[in-house]
Amino acid sequence: MYTKNLIRALSVLTPLALLASGCGGGSDQDSEEAGLSGMVAIDGSSTVFPISEAMAEEFQIANPGVRVTVGISGTGGGFKKFCAGETDISDASRPIKPTEIELCAENGVEAIEIPVAWDGLTVVRNPANDWATCMTVDELARLWQPGSTIQRWNQIRSDWPDEEIVLYGPDTDSGTFDYFTDAIVGEEDASRDDYTASADDNVLVVGVEGDAGSIGYFGFAYYEESSDRLGAVAVDNGAGCVAPSRTTIENGTYAPLSRPMFIYVKPNALAKPQVRAFVEFYLNNATALVPEVGYVPFLDERYEELLGGLPAGM
């Protein structure tokens, strides 16, 4: 069962927040409707990418006449494309910002927010690092805050080795960057800038794996897939060390780095049969496919509520 904090987070962001007016109702359209064709364009978060990629692959098997493209320009980059009318769906590892809503409105673009799964943003270390197996939120904040002068491990704890720290993390277009800075440093976008940044989490995995003194952070699915090559850093938020796992993410004990993930879709895109079918397929198959790519699904009832909240055909 979700903890109170996670329930509050989900209730604030959902159910299915229609960020612009004009739609209501529901639909029972079958995602495998015969004769579907056309394109579904998706871009955005590299964290949400594995889910959308898995959905796209399975959907195209069931609907060979539809082509689904999934890009990874980061949450912020994805919203830029979405608001410019270049995509139907935007993957996001954080809620859309007021400035992004304004940008969309300027271009006549509306957005429907659909939460799709839980993630546990994971702090990772090189496997040669056998000392930083747990860090407090304060230690992580001192390491990553703007202007941090920490360059060596023994500057965090005196009994840790006098070895250089090499930092890896998402770039500033990433929703993971936004979330981490807010949850750990205490202010969104507040971060030291002397680290290797990338919008592609696979690049970060390779970086941390290759540097003995390295530490970084990205979505849980990328850690789980690489857990034989990387070590996770448990986080102490005042209640002891808690390592990321599907259980601790789901029950909310992996705090403050458990978070919901989203897709955003345009109401006028839902008027396209192939887009509506894809979104319905996404929600109908989330319970099965989300765990396969390393994330934590909601309860079945939640996906049923989200399906029932989809705007009627327009």
Image: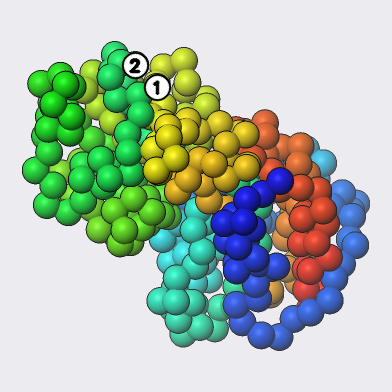
| Residue visible at 50% across and 53% down in the picture | 93
Q: How is the image coloured?
A: rainbow
Is any part of residue 305 visible from this angle? yes
Is any part of residue 163 visible from this angle? no
Q: Amino acid at mark 2?
A: Pro
Mark 1 surroundings: few (<14), some (14-19) or many (≥20) residues within 10 A: many
In this view, the residue in front, 107 or 9, is 9
In this view, the residue in front, 236 or 106, is 236
Say what secondary structure mark 1 lies in. strand
Mark 2 surroundings: few (<14), some (14-19) or many (≥20) residues within 10 A: many
Q: Where is residue 23 shown, x and y percent of the image?
A: 74, 81
In this view, the residue in front, 305 or 283, is 305
| Residue visible at 53% across and 71% down in the picture | 85
Cα distance in 3D space between marks 2 and 1: 5 Å
- When the figure is inspected, residue 12 is found, relative to residue 149, above or below; the finding is below
Q: Amino acid at mark 1?
A: Gly
Q: Where is residue 228 shown, x and y percent of the image?
A: 46, 15
Identify the mark at residue 127; answer none if there is no mark: 2
Ranked by sequence position, the earlier of labels 2 and 1 is: 2
Say what secondary structure mark 2 lies in. loop
Contact? badges 2 and 1 (CB < 8 Å): yes
Image quarter of residue 54: top right
Which residue in the protein does label 1 denote? 231
Left or right of residue 257: residue 158:
left
Image quarter of residue 11: bottom right
- When the figure is inspected, residue 286 is found, relative to residue 157, above or below; the finding is below
Q: Where is residue 8 shown, x and y percent of the image?
A: 60, 62
| Residue farthest toward the front in the current orientation of the protein | 239
